[in-house]
Image (spheres, rainbow, N blue to C red):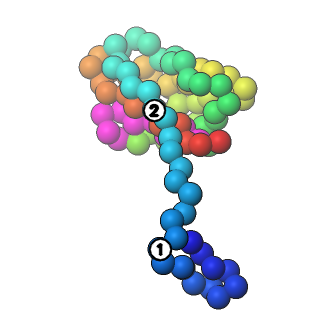
Amino acid sequence: KWDAANSEFVPGVAAAALSYSSSTFTGNGTLANYAIPAGHSVDDVLVYLNGVAQVPTTDYTIPPNSTVLTFGVAPLTGQSIVFRFLPV
């Protein structure tokens, strides 16, 4: 834990643990739209295709107040798709 008064970390005190949820899919070469939980945006969703991080707003978009993530190009057949939803 950071001790601001002394500008140092205090050993033995654990910081609050944050967790994330995730979804996995397999590309079929056609589907470009995927359902995601409400309340997320490109700022808090990490997307990986075959383990390679995708670039928000370049490789995929999530319109404001939407529950749909859209790839610019549908993932190829057999490609591993992983979404990681960061805490909001």
> What residue did someone put label 1 on?
12
**Eye-nearest disc, 1 or 2:** 1
Q: Position of residue 55 (x, y in %)?
A: 49, 41
| Mark 2 nearby-residue class (10 Å; few <14, some 14–19, many ≥20) | some
Extent of the magenta region: 44-52
Residue name at image x 29 percent, y 17 percent: 77
- Tag shown at residue 22: 2
Q: Which one is nearer the viewer's eye here, 82 or 29?
A: 82
Q: Quadrant of the N terminus?
A: bottom right
Residue name at image x 54 percent, y 79 percent: 10
User: 37 left or right of 51?
Assistant: right
Residue name at image x 65 percent, y 88 percent: 6
User: Which residue type does callout 1 highlight?
Assistant: Gly
Helix, strand or loop under label 2: strand
| Mark 1 nearby-residue class (10 Å; few <14, some 14–19, many ≥20) | few
Query: From this viewpoint, is residue 21 visible?
Result: yes
User: 68 left or right of 82?
Assistant: right
Q: Position of residue 54 (x, y in %)?
A: 44, 39
Q: Position of residue 56 (x, y in %)?
A: 55, 39
- Magenta span: predominant SS is strand
Task: Find out whether residue 22 is within the magenta segment.
Answer: no
